[in-house]
Amino acid sequence: QVQLVESGGGLVQAGGSLRLSCRTSGSVFSINAMGWYRQAPGKQRELVTTITSGGHTNYADSVKGRFTISRDNAKNTVSLQMNSLKPEDTAAYYCAAEVQTYISAVLRWYWGQGTQVTVSS
């Protein structure tokens, strides 16, 4: 079993900052990519950003220059620094990790339960 637990969400005014963190635990042998997705009410879940085990990053155009993803491979954690937040960033944010477990050699994606980010205008 693999568990992902997010923390750091909350309420912030437009222009403010928040930092999200996500810890992966359980039968983790290795982690390939990690990322953050978000889902606003009435909308589909969308990619925010991903980072590979080698540190290569990918960002949605809507967050480029404002959000920064980072990871600590030794601790199996991934973080998301969000600056210059806008009301349209309001959503539930989900952490995801592509994990190989001790039980199976097949990589598969695991998801956290989400943390709410609300940006007031």
Image (tube, rainbow, N blue to C red):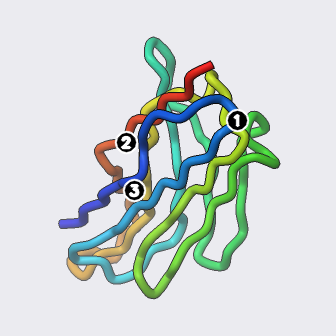
Crowd class of label 2 (few under 14; some 14 to 19; many from 20; radius 10 Å): many
Which residue appears at 51% of the width and 72% of the height? 32
Which residue appears at 50% of the width and 82% of the height? 73
Q: Find residue 80 and report its horizontal and vertical position in percent.
A: 57, 56
The alpha-carbon separation of the residues under discs 1 and 2 comes to 19 Å
Where 72 falls versus 121 (above or below)? below
Q: Quadrant of the C terminus?
A: top right
Name the secondary structure under disc 1: loop
Which residue matches tag 1? 15
Which residue appears at 54% of the width and 65% of the height? 33
Residue 29 vs residue 83: left or right?
Answer: left
| Dot 2 amino acid type | Thr
Of pointers 3 and 2, the one earlier in the residue sequence: 3
Which residue matches tag 2? 115
Of pointers 1 and 3, the one earlier in the residue sequence: 1
Of pointers 1 and 2, the one earlier in the residue sequence: 1
Crowd class of label 3 (few under 14; some 14 to 19; many from 20; radius 10 Å): some
The alpha-carbon separation of the residues under discs 3 and 2 comes to 18 Å
Residue 29 vs residue 32: left or right?
Answer: left
Which residue appears at 67% of the width and 29% of the height? 86
The alpha-carbon separation of the residues under discs 1 and 3 comes to 32 Å
Which residue matches tag 3? 109
Q: Check residue 100 in the rendering and tell me which mark sits there, or answer none.
A: none
| Dot 3 amino acid type | Trp
